[in-house]
Amino acid sequence: MSAQSLSASPAPVANERLVLGYSSIGHALMHYMAAFFPYIAVGMAASWGEPGQPLDHQVVLLPLWQLAAFLLGIAALPAGWLSDRWSAPGMIVVMFFGMGAAAIACAFVPDRSFLLLELAMAALGLFAAIYHAVGIAWVMRNASRPGHAMGINGVFGSAGLAACGAGTGLLINFFSWRAAFLVPGIICLIAGLGLLYHWRTGRVGDRPMPAMPGKQPSRGDLVRVFVILTVTMFAGGVIWQAIQYGAPGLFEQRMAAEVDWLQTMTNGQLAAEAKKMAFWVGLFGSAIYAVSGVTQYFLGGLSDRYSLKRVYVLAAFLQVLAMLGLAWLPGYGVFLAAMASVIISAASGPAENLLIGRYTPTRYHGLGFGAKFIVAFGAGPVAIWLIAHVKALTGSLELLFMGLAATGVLVWLVALMLPSGGDSRQAPEVAASPRPVPAE
């Protein structure tokens, strides 16, 4: 986008409610479908294993998502490049149709066709990568109240994560693991048809992004913060993805007695006996992200009241304690530790985003946030590899989370080197920007 277009007065908003609606639906579906395979794998383990010998889904099935997780991160920049040169609503249409077709293809993969499933899920990751590079900026450009619009958009992203575990568990419980792919795939196709119609009839459009004025930090601070945040965002991304992909297996291993008790208390009315683990593990996963989405609104204001560095450093320290809890706590303790980790990540997210906005030149904000999503989602394959290999070597994930606790100490020490001038109250450029929201 040229400097001239940035400085020009923005065009009128093209039906911002429809833009916000379709972008928010896309945000929810993208997060739902980027996180549902660990829960589906729990349900697939029995049907893809030998009679009486279910597969170890963390060692055999979870690595099939590794290529999808890689594409989910690396494809963000080319998706943004295409959006700049073609059309943001057009790219979201492509995302809806691509994710829908890929998920439906996954649903019809024959049993034990590991390569076909991996390729179909890779296509799912490729199309899901479009959202963060295109959808969030699309909302910001077309909202008369960007902060309010981004808040709504963030709620939908958190809702997608919160619905993922329970929705997947219910579909597996009452139908099969194939339905857990098929139903969200069909929903994506319906959303794509709706957006295609409104885009082609001119009811949904786009407009240029107005310039964001503000005093820029020194070049030295820019380089310093870039290096520090690259380290902390990657390590934090590994921790976040380890929870997303590893929590279902932790719940299955350490909460078997609790699942049996819940099954008894409900008289088996909620979950079929053969599928109870997939159902309850999915419910636990949904509860984690639902609570984190709610608490984000109470904790998100910390970055407005305290310095960004202080919030970021405190969150890094608390994350170490959460990792130790995941390594050692049994039963409901591991559930609470996973919830604490996700809440801490959600609370530190606004501070991290504000630091990016504060120390990135205005004309490169899109590139800065695009790089963040590559680093954050690019940690997914690393987390999956660690989960599969540690589980195969040790039979559990205690060693993994002890290692992540040590990594958290490194993140904390590196975060201490951030400049102290990143207070959002002293940064006019950031104060004028929309407040970042969870589930980005």
Image (cartoon, rainbow, N blue to C red):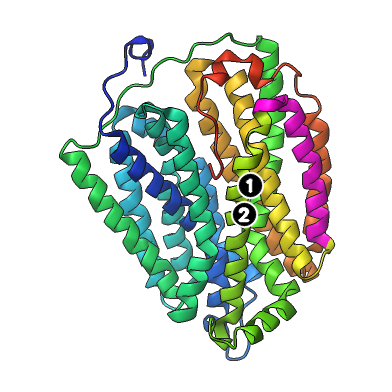
Position in image of residue 148 (x %, y %): 45, 33
Q: Main secondary structure of the magenta part?
A: helix
How crowded pointer 1 is (Cα within 10 Å; few <14, some 14-19, many 20+) is rated as some
Q: Residue furthest left?
A: 201
Left or right relative to 223: residue 429: left
Q: Residue at x 75, y 72 (%)?
A: 254
- Numbered circles on residues, count: 2
Whether residue 233 is visible here, answered yes or no, is yes
| First to last magenta residue range | 304-327
Left or right relative to 234: residue 8: left
Left or right relative to 33: residue 90: left
In the figure, residue 103 lies in which quadrant? bottom left
Q: CA distance from mark 1 to mark 2?
A: 6 Å
Left or right relative to 363: residue 395: right
Quadrant of the frame with the N terminus: top left
Above or below, comparing residue 366 to residue 6 in the picture:
below
Position in image of residue 422 (x %, y %): 69, 19
Mark 2, residue position: 291
Q: Are marks 1 and 2 in contact (CB under 8 Å)?
A: yes
In the figure, residue 106 lies in which quadrant? bottom left
| Nearer-the-camera pick, 378 or 433 | 433
Mark 1, residue position: 295
